Amino acid sequence: LVEAGALAFFKDLQPSASDFRADVLAGLRKPQKAISPKYFYDAAGSAIFDRITQAPEYYPTRTELALLERIGPELNTLAGSGAVVLEPGAGSSVKIRQLLDALDHPAGFVGMDISGDHVKAACADIASDHPDLTVGAVCHDFTQTLDLGALSIPEGRRIVFFPGSTIGNFELIDALQLLKTLRDWLRPGDALLIGVDLRKDPSVLEAAYDDAGGATADFNFNLVRRINAELNGDIDPSALAYRAFWNPYRSRVEMYLQALRDFHFTVAGERFVLRDHETIHTENSHKFTVATFQDLAVKAGLIPAHVWTEDGACAFSIHWLE
Ligand code: AVI
C-alpha cells in the first residue's frame, strides 16, 4: 500500500553543480559584461520571480494559464486516457495542476528540477492531491542529456510539458539544442506541449519586463546581492540602474544593469571597473511568431501538429509538437 502523498520514486541524477564563482568572474571579464540568468533563481530570487508573475504588467503567466484552461478539453482528447506527463524544470505547480485537471485519467507524472529538495516537495504535494496518479521526482538539469530508460517511468503516452516560455530565455542555438534534447524523450505518438510567448507591441513587452512595482528590477538586483554575499563582492547597488528594452533585430527583450557613474568594484578578490552607462547583460527573453517558433521546432526534428493562441494585446501560444 502506498501512502497518500508518497512518491513512487525519487531519483537523484546529480546534475553537475554549476560554478557560480567561475561563471560570474568569466562574465565580468568579457567586453560586454554578462551574468547567466540561471543565477537569478536562488531561494530569494525564486520568491521575487513569483512576485513578477503577479505584477499587472507581466502578462505571460496569467495569459498562458487562461489559454491552458480554454484548450483543456482539446488536450484531453489529444492525450487520451492513461497519459504520462513529464515536466522538465518543474517550477510552477499551478500550470501542471491545470493540465492534470484537464486530463481524464492521467496515469503518471514525473517532475524534474535542478533542485532536488524543491522537486521532491512539489511532486509529493501533487501526489497527495492525485492519489490515483503514479508520481515520480527526478533531480536533473534539463539542459543535460537524460537516459529515460534509467527511470521508472510508467507506461503510457508521454506528454513532455514545458510551459512558461522558458525556451525564450535561451540563445536561439541553445533553444534548438534544448528542443532536440526534449525530442529525444519522445516516441511515436508522444508529444511536447510547450508554451511560447509571441511578438507584440514593444510598449507591452517593455512594461512586462520593467514593471512599475519594481519586481523585475529587484530580481536583477538580487543578483548583485548574491554576488556581494556569496563571492565577497562590494558592488554598490546605488551605482546601478535596471534597464529593459526591446531589440527588434533579435526579436527579444534584453535586460541589463547599467552604471550610473564610473566605479570600481571587487568580486572574489578580482578588481573590475564599470564606466558610466556601461552595462552588465543579465537576460534575454525571445519572442516568436507562430511561424518562427514552428521553424525552430522543425529544425529540431519535431512536427508541429497543433497550435493554440491568445491573440489579444497579450498574445501567447501553446504548441503540440510530435
Ligand atoms: C522564466 N522566464 C520565462 C521569464 C521570462 O518572461 O522571460 C523570466 C523573466 N525575467 C524577467 N521577467 C521574467
Image (cartoon, grey):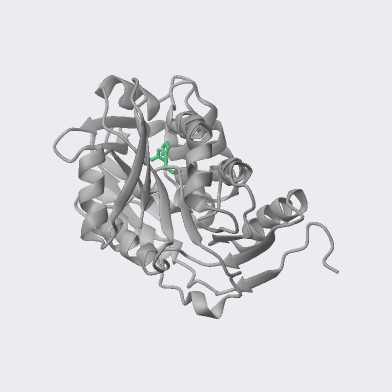
Q: Position of residue 203 (x, y in %)?
A: 28, 20
**Picture residue at 56% right of the left edge, 42% below the top:** 95
- Establish if 163 lies above or below 61: below
Determine which quarter of the picture holds residue 58. top left
> Which quadrant: the C terminus?
bottom left
- Establish if 282 lies above or below 147: above
Looking at the image, the residue that sits furthest to the left is 249
Residue 260 in view of the camera: no
Instruction: Name the foreground residue: 97 vs 74.
Output: 74
> Which quadrant: the N terminus?
bottom right
Q: Is residue 140 left or right of residue 283?
A: right
Residue 232 in view of the camera: yes
- Number of numbered discs visible in the structure rendering: 0
Q: Position of residue 23 (x, y in %)?
A: 37, 62
**Picture residue at 32% right of the left edge, 37% below the top:** 255
Q: Position of residue 157 (x, y in %)?
A: 51, 62
Q: Position of residue 311 (x, y in %)?
A: 33, 25
**Picture residue at 42% right of the left edge, 68% below the top:** 185
- Please tell me in which quarter of the rendered image ligand 1 is found: top left
Looking at the image, the residue that sits furthest to the bottom is 150
Instruction: Name the foreground residue: 255 vs 259.
Output: 255
**Picture residue at 24% right of the left edge, 34% below the top:** 276
Determine which quarter of the picture holds residue 262. top left
Q: Is residue 83 left or right of residue 316?
A: right
- Establish if 167 lies above or below 315: below
